[in-house]
Every structure is written in structure tokens, then in C-alpha cells.
Amino acid sequence: MRNSAAGFTLIEIMVSLVILAVAMLGIAGIHGLSTRYTNKSYFRSQAVNQAYDILDRMRANPDGISTGNYNPVFSSNKSAGNCLLSSCSPSDLASFDLSEWNDLNRSVLPSGSGFVTVEGFNVSVVVRWIESTGRNGENKPRSVKVTVRI
């Protein structure tokens, strides 16, 4: 009777190890997906924060808005001076705001950029970035658009 049960416990242990290995692979896969989705939501949150940052800057410079200094500018140009250290005209402040804002976009978002469109009292802000999909090194352009009435 003893000989027929020999090795049975070893088989149970091996089956348990296979089940444990499959479970650990599943946990690793879920962890990878959660990390990817966390990064996506982080970038989206940063883009929304950046959109509201330029809107706050615009609210602080109403003369720059009314004279059209924010519209339509793709803000890749550098401003002439630093408006934090000296006083600036509304147009110089708008140029400084857009330049500094896009520098921040590039620093908090991968290939981040943004632009502003003012139509009457409506302001649209678009923030763009490149997001890795995780599949074969593929990247996708993403954007957030915020439209408010100032």
C-alpha cells in the first residue's frame, strides 16, 4: 500500500508551483497595465493643469487679450525679456507668458506644446503631447482642449 502512494506529494507540490507561477505572471501583467494607465492619466492631468495655467496668465493680462496679443499664436517664439524681473507692456507680457508656458509644456509632457485661440470672449487652449502606447514602440499624439469664456 505504501509503494502505490510514493511521489504523490511531489506531484501536488509541482502542480501548486505551476499555479503559483501563472498567478505571478498575471500579477506582473496587471502591474504593467496599471503603470501604463497611471502614466496616461498623469499626462492628461498635467495637460489640463497647463491649459488652466495659461488661462490664469491671460486673466492677469486683460489688456493683452483685448488687443489680440494671445491670438492666434503658436507659442514657440521666445519673448524679448523677462517680465518677472521688469515691467512689460501687455503685448510683451503675452509673448513672455506664451513662451514660458510652452517651456513648461515641454518640461512636464513628452514633446509637449500648446496654442491659444481667442474668438471674442471665448478662449480655446489646446495642449498636445506624444504618448507611448507600449506596443512595438508606437507613439500616438494626444491633446486636451479647454474652452472657456473670459
Image (cartoon, grey):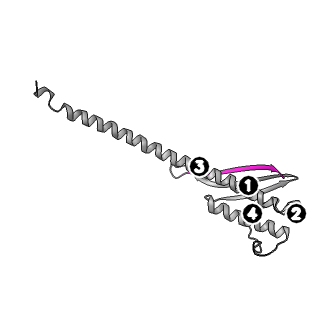
Closer to the eye: label 1 or 3:
1
Q: Residue 116: which quarter of the image?
A: bottom right
Q: Is residue 120 left or right of residue 112?
A: right
Task: Tell me which residue sits at (38%, 39%) in the image.
Answer: 23
Quadrant of res 86: bottom right
Q: Earlier in the sequence, mark 4 or mark 2?
A: 2
Give me the residue at 39% from left, 42% from top. Answer: 25
- In this picture, residue 11 sits left or right of residue 109: left
Part of the protein shown in magenta: 138-150
Q: Is residue 149 left or right of residue 104?
A: right
Q: CA distance from mark 1 to mark 3?
A: 19 Å
The answer for how far apart the CA atoms under marks 1 and 2 are is 19 Å
Assign a secondary structure to mark 1. Answer: helix
Q: Which mark is residue 52?
A: 1
Q: Secondary structure at mark 3?
A: helix
Q: Earlier in the sequence, mark 3 or mark 2?
A: 3
Residue at numbered disc 2: 63
**Viewer-side label of 4, 2:** 2
**Identity of the residue furthest to the top in this view:** 1
Q: Position of residue 118 (x, y in %)?
A: 83, 55
Judging by the rendered image, the residue that carries numbered circle 3 is 40
Q: Label 4's element? A: loop
Residue wearing tag 4:
75
Q: Give the answer, above or below, for where 99 lies relative to 148.
A: below
Q: Earlier in the sequence, mark 3 or mark 4?
A: 3
